[in-house]
Amino acid sequence: MAAVYQALHRRVSSLVCRLHSTYVRKMRYLNQLKEDDSLCRQAQTSGTFYLFHNLSPFLQKVGKKYLVPQLSAAEMRRVLEKFPEAEQWMEKSVLIGCSDEHRPRFALDLGALDKSVIESELQGSFTDLRKALFVVDREDSPLLASAQSLLRWHDSHQYCSRTGQPTHKNPAGSKRVCHASGVTYYPQMSPVVITLVSDGSRCLLARQPSFPPGMFTALSGFCDMGENVEEAVRREVAEEVGLEVESLSYSASQHWPFPSSSLMIACHALVAAQRAEISMDTLELEEARWFGLEEIVEGLKRQPSSSKQGDGSFLPWFPPKQAIAHQLIQEWLQQQTAQTA
Ligand SMILES: NC(=O)C1=CN([C@@H]2O[C@H](COP(=O)(O)OP(=O)(O)OC[C@H]3O[C@@H](n4cnc5c(N)ncnc54)[C@H](OP(=O)(O)O)[C@@H]3O)[C@@H](O)[C@H]2O)C=CC1
Ligand SMILES: [Mg+2]
C-alpha cells in the first residue's frame, strides 16, 4: 500500500512540476542550491563561471562588441592550475543565477592572482564596472552589477562584528556564518529613493559636483532608518531643493551597484506650480533647476562627448538607458507629450 502511495505521490509531484512555468522551476532550483550545500558543491562542477579581478569583470572584445564570457568548470580548473595557491578557489565562487536548462552560474573574484596571466590566457581584460555596465549587451548589465555587489559584500564581511572571528560563506554565497557566535549574516542593499519632481509642465533635475560635466539627473537619497518610501521622497525633496511634495507615484525599481549596493526606488512627484521656487542645498548639490519639455527632448538626444561648447561650458545631458533616472525622464516626457497632444 505504501509503495502504491509513494508511486502516486511521485506521479503527482512530477505532474505539478511539469505544470510549473520555466520561471517557477528555475527559482525553485536556485532556492534549493542556496539551501542544500552538497547540491551546490556538486553544481559547481557543472556550472559556468563569470570572472572578476578586484571587483572588475572579465570582458572579451570581439570586433566592436564587448562580451561577458562564461567559463566552464573545466576551463576554470585550467586557469587555476597556473596558480598552485589557487587550487581550491572554485569554492570561493558565489551563485548568481542559472540558465533555463538549470545550468548554474557562479561568479568568482581572482583578485589575489596575477591578472596579466589570466588576461593573456583567456584573451580578454578585466574592465572597471563603471565602463563595463555601459558597453556590454543590455541583458548582461544587471547580471554583472548583482554579481559584483555580492562579491563586494563577501569581501567586506569576512569577520563577525560581534566576536571579530572569521565568518564562513555557505557554498552558494547566500550567507556567512560566525561559528563562534552563531550569528548569520545575509547580503544587504541600502534602499535609495530617486524622484523626478514635476510642477505640471516642467521637471526638476540636479547635479552634484562629482558628476561628469553637463550631467543632470533626478534627485536621490538614502532612506533613513524606519522611513517608508513616501516619507523618504518627501524628506529628500525638502532637504535638497526646499520644495514640498503634494503627491507621488511609484514607477519602478533597480539594483544599483555604486558605490556599494543600493535598491533604487524610482518615483514621480508633483509640487504645486505656484510654490515651485527652488532653494538648493549647496552642500550636496552644485546646481538644481527646472527643465521644460524642449530642453528635455534636446538633452536626451545629446551625448556626453557632444555637450561641450566652444566657450568651455557644457550643455545638459542625462544618464544613459541603463540608469533608472533615464526611465523616469522618458516617462515624464511621454506623459507631457500625451497631455499636450
Ligand atoms: N541609477 C540611477 O539612475 C541613479 C543612481 N543614484 C545613486 O543613488 C545613490 C544615493 O544618491 P545620493 O544623492 O548620493 O544620496 P544622499 O542624497 O542620501 O546623499 C549621499 C550621502 O548620504 C550619506 N549616506 C547616508 N546613508 C548612506 C548609505 N547607506 N550609504 C552611503 N552613503 C550614505 C553619505 O554621506 P557621508 O559620505 O557624509 O557619510 C553620502 O555622501 C548614489 O549611490 C547614486 O549612485 C543616483 C542618481 C541616479
Ligand atoms: Mg542626494
Image: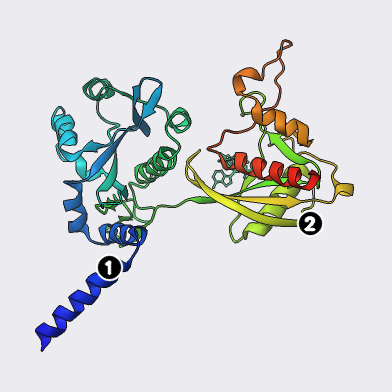
- Which image quarter has ligand 1? top right
Residue at image mark 1: 17
Instruction: Estimate how packed mark 1 is, as few (under 14), some (14 to 19) or many (20 or more) residues with alpha carbons within 10 Å.
Output: few
Which amino acid is tagged 2? Glu
Is ligand 1 less than 8 Å from the beta carbon at label 1?
Answer: no
Q: Position of residue 24 (x, y in %)?
A: 35, 62
Q: Nearer the viewer, residue 325 or 229?
A: 325
Q: Secondary structure at mark 1?
A: helix
Residue 214, visible in the rendered structure: yes
Q: Mark 2 to mark 1: distance in Å?
A: 48 Å
Q: Position of residue 168 (x, y in %)?
A: 27, 52
**Farthest residue in the bottom direction?**
1
- The residue located at (66%, 20%) in the rendering is 307
Residue at image mark 2: 246
Tell me whether circle 2 and circle 1 mark residues in contact (CB < 8 Å). no
- Rendering quarter of residue 319: top right
Query: In the figure, is residue 176 to the left or right of 44?
Result: right
Q: Secondary structure at mark 2?
A: loop
Front label number (2 vs 1):
1
